[in-house]
Image (tube, helix red, strand yellow):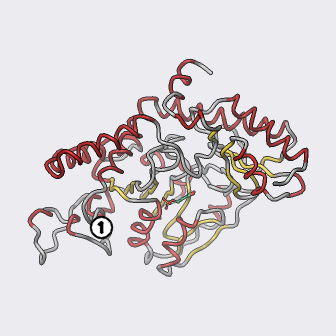
Amino acid sequence: MTSFWQKIRADFPVTRRCAYLDHASAGPIPKPVAAAYEKYSRVHLAQADFSWPRWIRQREEIRIKTARFINAEPDEIAFTHSTSHGMNLIAELLHCKGKVLCNTLEFPSSTVPWLWRGAPMIFQQDENGAVPIPVLKKNLTAGVKTIVSSFVQYGTGYRQDMEALGRLKKNRFLVVNATQGCGALAVDVKRWQADFLCTNSYKWLLGGYGGGFLYVNRRWLGLLKPESAGWRSMREPDRMDNRRLDLRRDAGRYEWGCPAFPVIFAMGAAIDYLMQIGMARIERRVLELSTYAAERLEGAGFEVVTPRVAGKTQSGIVVFRLAHAAPAAPVVKKLLAAGFYVSARGAGIRVAPHFYNTFEEIDSFVKKVKSFVMTGSRP
Ligand SMILES: Cc1ncc(COP(=O)(O)O)c(C=O)c1O
């Protein structure tokens, strides 16, 4: 490990406790994010609401950074509490617009908000854990008005070619669930021609629980009317006008009440942290680690089910099967007790390293899982 990554690793005290290889479930927070939480709590303790104007300014600075992080504009960003919250806001706008094309691999956050509203859904069947663009193209019939896709699939690690999807969509809405990529792989809503995107703060983004953001392409802000609004969705909330509806023109209209300051500040610190390292550098490192994990697992005789086309379908997630379709959960439990944090997902065990993990951790993980499976031991 180079001294650069060694230094970075010191920001993650969880590394002293275990090989933490499960950023697809939830990431740790690095020290600068913990410092942002602590600072907020100190200031709130001492100054209470005297800090309100400063906090509002700080939130707007984070809005600008968040926009830059995904190549959007600040007026296109709304802070949310989760991916599910963001997807519900999107479904609210689009569920009546025609058929929604998604696929069988999607996490429920991508589908439940649409099903709940009775939107007509088409579930494209995956092909060995992938959603190939040529097949998806065949499903783009005239009635389909919205395409919902995860950037990376949680259960197989398949990374969708979002740029290709953007080129295909024509006059349809492209809705992206970026949860399993954002923070590990570069996101560019302009290059992807995304209309909407939602994500949360607690996985690869390393910002802790309770936050997220929504991107709404500027073009739709004036044209699509939200079903929900609150006093802080108004242009001048401090007038406290309880009769007149004068909605904000920007994506801030989706923020109904007072801001979740600590969570937004933590997410802002996480985005600063990631941008200081550089998303291109992070993406390279994450892909090196996940490629290494897949190769080592295959070398040890495991079947890797994650579709792997270098530089195209790979992500930070690698899923592998145990021999004879043995259940993954008991092995995961043993791995956890042995200091390897991974999870049972999809067809087997999911390994999801971030940039501060090491090749040595992956070596020891593969050795350990092999020893458990070889001995056939069960807890
Ligand atoms: C692709 C995807 N979307 C959404 C979620 C859940 O996000 P939230 O809890 O923020 O709604 C997950 C959780 O694993 C996920 O993998």
The residue lying at 60 percent from left, 73 percent from top is 122
Q: Is residue 95 above or below residue 215?
A: below
User: From the viewer's perspective, is 91 left or right of 50?
Assistant: right
- Single out the residue that lies furthest toward the bottom: 118
In this rendering, does residue 111 appear at all? Answer: yes
Q: Amino acid at mark 1?
A: Leu
The residue lying at 47 percent from left, 41 percent from top is 29
Q: Nearer the viewer, residue 325 or 284?
A: 325
User: From the viewer's perspective, is 78 left or right of 242?
Assistant: right
Q: Position of residue 312 (x, y in %)?
A: 64, 42
- Single out the residue that lies furthest toward the top: 3
For the residue with label 1, is its CB less than 8 Å from the closest atom of ligand 1? no
How many marks do you count on the picture? Answer: 1
The residue lying at 52 percent from left, 53 percent from top is 179
Residue on which the image places disc 1 = 223
Q: Nearer the viewer, residue 3 or 279?
A: 3
Q: Is residue 290 above or below residue 222?
A: above
User: From the viewer's perspective, is 44 left or right of 157?
Assistant: left
**Quarter containing the C terminus:** bottom right
In this rendering, does residue 313 appear at all? Answer: no
Q: Position of residue 1 (x, y in %)?
A: 63, 21
Q: Position of residue 314 (x, y in %)?
A: 66, 43
Q: Nearer the viewer, residue 70 or 171?
A: 70
> Counting other residues with Cα less than 10 Å from the Cα at mark 1, is it few (<14), some (14-19), or many (20 or more)?
few
